[in-house]
Image: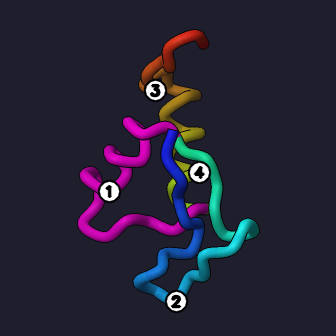
Amino acid sequence: MTAEHLHAQCDGGQDTPANIVAACAFCNNQRHAMFPKAPDAQTYETFVLLCVAAGLWHQHAGS
């Protein structure tokens, strides 16, 4: 797991508990590799939900 800022620090996001969530290291790295600029949390959530619904999301170990 990694810590992910919901509102990026480079965009003014704070290092506060309300702005940090646990993220799968693979997913977090892919998020940044897949998009020229990392999408906001809501946009990425929609992307993940569409991938899951289409059966295109990877399985995490133990899930």
Q: Residue furthest top?
A: 62
Disc number at residue 12? Answer: 2
Marked residue nearer the N-terminal end (1 or 3): 1
Give the label, 1 or 3, closer to the camera: 1
Are circles 3 and 2 on residues that touch, CB within 8 Å? no
Q: Which residues are magenta?
A: 24-41
Give the label, 1 or 2, closer to the camera: 2
Circle 4 is placed at which residue position? 45
**Tag 4: Cα neighbours inside 10 Å, few (<14), some, or many (≥20)?**
few
In the picture, measured across the screen, residue 37 lies left or right of residue 53, that is: left
Specify the amino acid type for callout 1.
His
Q: Is residue 22 magenta?
A: no
Task: Say which element carries label 4.
Answer: helix
In this rendering, the answer to whether 19 lies above or below 22 is below
**Tag 1: Cα neighbours inside 10 Å, few (<14), some, or many (≥20)?**
few
Disc number at residue 57? Answer: 3
